[in-house]
Amino acid sequence: MNEFTLSDGLRAIQKAFDLADPRLKGHGEQTAFLMWRMLDRLGCTRARMVSLTTAALFHDMGAYKTDVGHSFSEFELLNTASHCVYGYLYTRFYSPFPSFAPVILYHHTGYLYKQYIDSSFLTDSLLLNLSDRVSFVFLTQENPDLSFLNALSGIDFDPKHVSAFLEADREEGLLRALKDGSYHEKLHAFWRETALSRSEVMRYARMLMYTIDFRSEQTVTHSISVTSLSKLLCGLLGLDHVDTSIVTASAMLHDIGKITTPVEILEKKGPLNEEEMAIMKKHAHASYEILKELGFDNIALIASSHHEKLDGSGYPRGLKGDEIPFYSRILAVADILSALIGERSYKGPMPKGQVTAILGGMACRNQLDPIVTSVALEHYDDLITFSAEDCAQAMEDYHSIKAEYTRLMQQFELMEEEQRKASYSI
Ligand SMILES: [Fe+2]
Ligand SMILES: [Fe+2]
Ligand SMILES: [Fe+2]
């Protein structure tokens, strides 16, 4: 297998964003490309450019907490604070580049209000703001041009950056590269030169896992509990280290396709109706589409088959019996167990007797794998204890993020209030 590079990982992430909101197709990569060209011309080091372009790809990640299905202009122009704060928190808590989180926090704070931005991140946040806006204009206007840059120079953008950007555009054709799509290959060629270690790949996977789970209070610990349950089941089933790590990675990312599921559906108290269920079910195929971009076809297939049933009644493909990979059957048992023991706001955790009866019944009806199910039932108490420890940590992080979110949003409100007062007195 060829070396796994940053390009492979980030291609999958852009795919996830594109599926979640097609109106923003390519927005992260376009912003990263423009940021890269600017940083390069400013003499930035390669290591810093790698981190900053990665942060640029992720800059709107916070918008997927609430905004899928809402207006692009709404969160990019009007109510910008929420996605800046969530993007900052996810980056600080979970990304492999936490020190760049402030760049994301301030990516919509204009040049006129630069006194609010920490001076060590001022240039990078203003460059991200400008690159972001050029991509936004490109994606939302029929005949995009760059005249808005001069109009907003000294207000939203640093005048030095505007001149540098226009010069870069004249010399390199930045807007043309967005129009003809050539930016994509240029940017990925740059990212391909950075190999990712196994532990770095796992950090990205962890970041995505939490981003997806934290979209709803109902799913906060779901992927982490499926991951712990699957890992322990692998040990009990005698899988070796390599196979266990394939199952673990698939478990972490099995629901990544839920980035496409509206929060209202994830949060619904009570059973879903037919239409909502059809939307929810799309997440399994979306997981496949996203994970196949990584180039690990086995992980894409294993992860996306976690709702398949041995009798063919599952989804997304309706696979039967041996057509379902054995590792997906481990995920299927872990997934159902996690859902049954998890607390939802409309129901408490289910008692052991009821959970074991449901799992046993599904195995008898040829839906779940009988071997995996019997191992799970036999070691039920160990599985529950093992996953509870991991979930407690995830829950603690979730509450810290929520508290920090409230604190930072108050700070942003104060800052916006001061900005409003300042603009009245101009
Ligand atoms: Fe944004
Ligand atoms: Fe953006
Ligand atoms: Fe799922």
Image (cartoon, grey):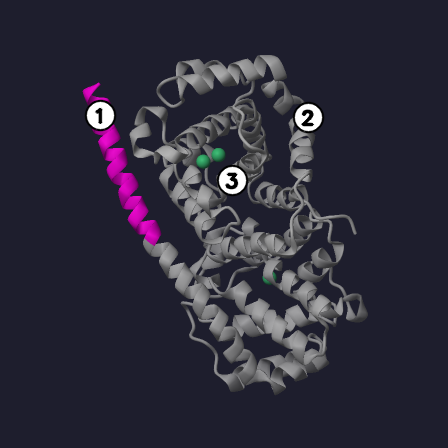
Report the image quarter containing ligand 3. Answer: bottom right
Residue located 54% across and 40% down the image: 51
Crowding at mark 2 (Cα within 10 Å: few <14, some 14-19, many 20+) = few
Q: In this picture, which residue range is highlighted in magenta?
A: 404-426
What x and y, as percent, mark residue 318?
73, 62
Residue nearest the observer in this picture, 282 or 167? 167
Q: Assess whether residue 388 is covered by the magenta stretch.
A: no
Residue nearest the observer in this picture, 125 or 327? 125
Q: Which mark is residue 422?
A: 1
Quarter of the figure with residue 205: bottom right
Q: CA distance from mark 1 to mark 3?
A: 31 Å
**The residue tagged with tag 3: helix, strand or loop?**
helix
Q: Assess whether residue 413 is covered by the magenta stretch.
A: yes
Which residue matches tag 2?
182
Give the vertical position of 257 relative to 124 (above or below). below
Q: CA distance from mark 1 to mark 2?
A: 42 Å
Residue type indicated by callout 2: Ser
Of pointers 1 and 2, the one earlier in the residue sequence: 2
Q: Is residue 414 visible?
A: yes
Q: Are marks 1 and 2 in contact (CB under 8 Å)?
A: no
Q: Which mark is residue 55?
A: 3
Residue located 72% across and 74% down the image: 239
Mark 3, ligand 2, within 8 Å: the answer is no
What x and y, as percent, mark residue 45?
55, 32
**The residue tagged with tag 1: helix, strand or loop?**
helix
Q: CA distance from mark 3 to mark 2?
A: 21 Å
